Image (cartoon, grey):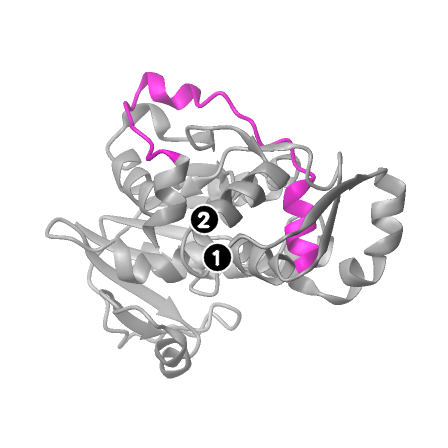
Amino acid sequence: MDILISGLNNYIGRRCTSLMADENFRLFAITRNRKLFEQRMSDPIHAQIAEVDLLKGDAGDDIQLPYLDASFYFTQVPTLDDMVNVKVELLYLRNFIRLIKRLNCNRLVYVARLMDRQYLQPILDLLKEFQMDYTVVLKNIVVGKDCLLYDIYQQISVRKTVFYSKQYGGGLLQPIGIHDFIRWLKAILHVPNFHYNVIELGGGEAISTVDLYRLYRKLKMKLKVQRIISLPNWLFGLIYRRNMNDNTEVSEFLRLMQVNGVVDNSWSNYLPFKFTPLKEILLAE
């Protein structure tokens, strides 16, 4: 199969260029600046990269891409709950659809986050406007080497005291290992019941953000004396208000923490799938 992906600034899109290709998947990817992307990659790239600026929609007729069997689009804006972000995302997606249509492809998997579930209608309207054979995937947090969660955990691991609250850290997540997620994305292309559907995906185990941090420290770091203290939501918000406003990484992390991240994975009725145990995921990379 010849597959095209877009959204290489997205963690999953970036890791796909290393992990998705195999003897049955010939992988292509587009980015605005190929040289800059390749310089930022620490892992081997197993995809053919083409330069396309979807903001301008300037893919020329000489673009070196074959006819495609399917495509993956990873959300390219921080959140869909902002009208400006939605307009930018729709422009990116519209131009991506026009490109894959030129390449004789009508199959598109659109990957967003669980926190985007309330704001999907403009995306669905656009997919229907172009009569795409779509699957929309709303994923829980995906973890692996160089992911946002690990970066934040590394930053707070050096502190003597870590604060959390019920709203910011007490809720449940279902983390998905990056290798599992990419394996799952490839498998869903062949499941008829997933066409023209929105699928919510969580990993095999539910755990709170603070307990996931405790497990991460235990498995991946030298244990240091550190107090982990629960605060009322208002006090936590007051302490970290500046970080929420000024630090985009922290802001995105805290948005993820507030989402109810437990889903029933009802899709498994049509696709048997075995998740890697969480401890193995944390130790894998």
Of residue 142 and residue 26, the one placed in the foreground of this image is 142
- Identify which residue is drawn at 89% across, 42% down: 234
**Residue 121 visible:** no
Stretch of the chain drawn in magenta: 250-277
Q: Describe residue 211's horizontal placement relative to residue 22 as left or right.
A: right
Q: Which mark is residue 143?
A: 2
- Identify which residue is drawn at 40% across, 73% down: 52
* Measured Cα–Cα span from mark 1 to mark 2: 6 Å
The amino acid pointed to by label 1 is: Cys
Q: Which residue is mark 1?
A: 147
Q: Position of residue 215 (x, y in %)?
A: 51, 41
Q: Describe residue 263's horizontal placement relative to residue 240 as left or right.
A: left
Q: Position of residue 122 (x, y in %)?
A: 61, 43
Q: Position of residue 160 (x, y in %)?
A: 71, 57
Contact flag, marks 1 and 2 (Cβ < 8 Å): yes
The amino acid pointed to by label 2 is: Val
**Residue 179 visible:** yes
Farthest residue in the front direction?
A: 225
Quarter of the image that includes the C terminus: bottom left
* Above or below 35: residue 196: above
Q: Position of residue 238 (x, y in %)?
A: 89, 52
